[in-house]
Image (tube, helix red, strand yellow):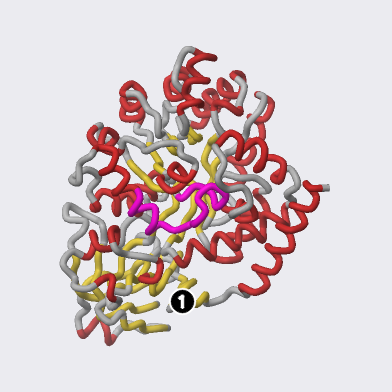
Amino acid sequence: MIRFKNARIMTLAGDDPFKITEGEVWTDGDKIAFIGVPTKEQLESTKFEREICVMKNLLMPSFKNAHTHSAMTFLRSYADDLPLQKWLFEKVFPLEAKLTGEDVYYFTKVANLEYLTSGITASFDMYFELDDYVKACTEMGFRSVMCGSVSGEAGRIKEVEENFLKYNEVSPLIGYRLGFHAEYTCDEKLLEAMGRLAEKYKAPVYTHNSETESEVEGCINKYGKTPTALFDSLGIYNFGGGGFHCVHMTEEDLDIFKKRGAYIVTNPGSNSKLASGIADIRAMKDKGIGLAIGTDGPASNNALDMFREMYLMTVLGKLREKDAAACDAYDVLYAATVGSAKAMGLDDCDTLEVGKQADIIMIDLKQPNMQPMNNIPKNIVYSGSKSNVALTMCAGKVLYENGKFTDFDTDEIYKGAQERAVRIQNEVKN
């Protein structure tokens, strides 16, 4: 067991999720074993393999990155300052065609390292070369839920079903959800097949949805419906799921999300960088739709930093409404932790409670940006940064602590990733 003592604790559970108490958190294996103030008898009867003095810093649930394409680290700052469609079809797709499984393995490890520095212990990843992706995550002890990413014709639905059955069984750290890339990259028969697959397994489905105005307009011109209305008509959201981005949503679209219990995963950094627009967070919250946050991929953001996403989510929400009271920081912090976990189906990783997964971060409150401590949760959103992440634990294992990774050869990872990025760029040029 690991004992965290002399801690401030924010569980994000119950009727008062942001209440901060003082006490201890104990972990046993991959689970939380105790939260509170132990008795003398409890301490005398418990053996700890390690004791960590938190020094009145804050323990809280880790962040979950509810939409990303981790292995796209090889495209970071390679094709910037372009509109989405040009960026995607002229820059991204040609290089992705050169990827090997080993490439994905190294590029994923780079992303996972960055996640850990930001207090992120789980990613909702949409990509390919899944065996190598899973190998990278499990070797690092990093949690991931993979999302189906198929595009093209209906025949590819078999691939989604095979992956759904395979990857939900490979490791406690790994999950797989039904999904496809986007309406504009899939033909109608594939979308129809996705609806049938959701019905077969009574499973939620996830996809890029209404990211740009041109995407929505193109769908209306083709089908006479918005992407959300199209998906709903095909039964894709009958068992929930979610949409990534959801910037250009109609009231009908939001009603569908509410009715189906689907989550909206907002990506304010990527949406801003690609000039896609600002999501109507207030309308989504007023409808009672579940909200989550993702960084999107490192090619379109380019950082994998949850602190930056939280700040952008709240300030852009205020700017859109011209109302400083819009998009409350409490709601944003909740979305980055509990909301994102629930959107990913990680119901045992959302809060700090006995019996749940020990996915925990320590926030250093003794830095200038956290002083004075008037409102710690809001200060995390408005003033916090990656420099405040003193420790990141995933499934009961400390992976990052005091600015250092505990068990990774970062030089080897960086070297392998750089060599492969250069090779891919040269292959495309030649």
Left or right of 421? Residue 12 is left
Residue 66 place in picture, x, y as percent: 44, 48
**Magenta segment includes 332:** no
Question: Does any portion of residue 242 appear in the rendered image?
Answer: no
Q: Nearer the viewer, residue 275 or 159?
A: 275
Q: Residue furthest right?
A: 430
Left or right of 142? Residue 370 is left
Q: How many marks?
A: 1
Identify the residue shown where x is 58% and y is 23%.
Answer: 193
- Magenta span: predominant SS is loop
Identify the residue shown where x is 69% and y is 26%.
Answer: 155
Question: Does any portion of residue 276 appear in the rendered image?
Answer: yes
Identify the residue shown where x is 78% and y is 46%.
Answer: 428
Residue 307 place in picture, x, y as percent: 37, 59
Q: 312 above or below 38?
A: above
Please state the extent of the stretch shown in magenta in the rendering. 295-312
Q: Which residue is mark 1?
A: 403
Identify the residue shown where x is 34% and y is 33%.
Answer: 261
What's under tag 1, amino acid-wise?
Gly
Q: Badge 1, how many Cα within 10 Å: few under 14, some, many 20+?
A: few
Residue 282 place in picture, x, y as percent: 25, 37
Left or right of 240? Residue 416 is right
Q: Nearer the viewer, residue 240 or 223?
A: 223
Q: 158 above or below 235?
A: below
Q: 279 above or below 335?
A: above
Residue 167 place in picture, x, y as percent: 59, 47
